[in-house]
Amino acid sequence: MTPDRSPEFLARLDAWIDAHFDEQVAFLQKLVQVPTDTPPGNNAPHAERTAALLAGFGFDAEKHAVPQQEVRDYGLESITNLIVRRAYDAGGPVIALNAHGDVVPPGEGWTHDPYGGEIVDGRLYGRAAAVSKSDFATFTFATRAVEALRSAGVPLKGGIELHFTYDEEFGGELGPGWLLGQGLTKPDYLIAAGFGHEVITAHNGCLQLEVTVHGVMAHAAIPDSGVDALQGAVAIMNALYAENTRYRAEIRSQVPGISHPYINIGWIQGGTNTNVIPGKVVMKIDRRMIPEEDPVQVEAGIRRLITEAAASRPGVSVDIRRLLLAESLKPLPGNRPLVEAICRHGAEVFGEAIPVSGTPLYTDVRLYCAQGIPAVIYGAGPRTVRESNAKRADEHLVLDDLRRATKVVARTLLEMLG
């Protein structure tokens, strides 16, 4: 039996991870304790801290700083992406492991310090504890475990790259998109941050638009002297929400784990005072696209819907600006070796079948697949985003999920590189 499938070698991998688990948890705590709230998006300090911690393991992290003006034009403050390259014997594939360090701000309602990394009842609390600083730890220690076997004489072919990036919350174009666009990496396979109880091979796309509704400001005592931009915005909102009803009834995805498209109006601002007819209202909307949809047609349809709704209010005009267009992820045929290995080892480690599914989220993985790189989403975490409180108060990671996911990733790397 080859080393990649031998129960003896798999047991040695698992034992190394168990023996170093306290060290892995401490590593994750240190990552959580450096804020990466985006906005404002000052993420370079976390990259520096991560690189220093990796150096303690003998891993040299290349620091790829995105030019300052490019970052500021994007609406952020600083981005330094990291690549760690671990080369083994010739003749095997290069497998990249990607996780993002940028996160949404913590918000209100926390009962634990969002930057404390506090451990209570087997759970590590903190912003990004689950999504996705956890997988900085998963991927780093899975790589270390595989290399421990290599040091003991187990041959490895190919290589591993750790990609720790800082632009997932804004779309990934200055994270993995920038690394790929600069020609800094072109791996043969990718495993990206995810949760441990399923393998994700497809995800939704996302269109985000800023809609500015123009009216004419006037005194509330003489409303007919103005044009109420808020009433125009209400007409637009009603039209958009009506689309959600239509989506549920008429448009369904065939991908397990993905249901139907959805529109969310996530931000709205307008008016100057309670006694003034609003002259301008600005909204930001988020349209999730199922894999079967054409993004060009979706955007054209939403723009048409908004324009027609605004026209129903005399005197109202509208400007529409695209903020983000993230295409959906469709599985590439070449991802089969990754999927099969993770499902097999996951079933052994978790003691239950690991299903293959899609997710309504959107991720940086689409950027790798657009370059022809077969990819899957798998890492440390529960069955659902809700269980982890990701993007909510008291985000946390069950430490046993971290341990088990690290074993699954390490076993998969050994099989792919063995």
Image (cartoon, helix red, strand yellow):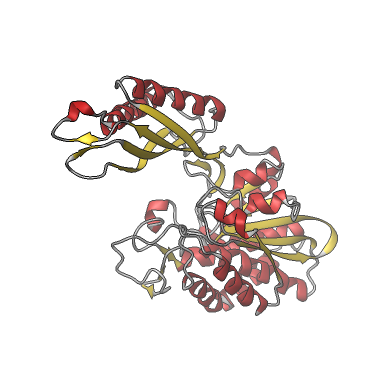
**Residue nearest the viewer, comparing 319 with 285:** 319
Say whether residue 224 is left or right of residue 80.
left
Say whether residue 144 is left or right of residue 362.
right
From what the image shows, is residue 353 above or below residue 45?
above
Q: Residue at x 40, y 55 (%)?
A: 391
- Residue farthest to the right, as pictured: 90
Find residue 49 and report its horizontal and vertical position in percent: 58, 74
Q: Residue at x 51, y 57 (%)?
A: 351
**Residue nearest the viewer, comparing 177 with 403:** 177
Find residue 45 and report its horizontal and vertical position in percent: 55, 70
State the image quarter where residue 233 is shown: top left
Find residue 337 and report its horizontal and vertical position in percent: 69, 47
Find residue 370 and report its horizontal and vertical position in percent: 67, 40
Q: Residue at x 57, y 65 (%)?
A: 136
Say whether residue 21 is left or right of residue 314.
right
**Residue nearest the viewer, comparing 54 with 314:** 314
Q: Quadrant of the C terminus?
A: bottom right
- Residue farthest to the left, as pictured: 221
Q: Quadrant of the N terminus?
A: bottom right
Q: Is residue 406 visible?
A: yes
Q: Is residue 341 visible?
A: no
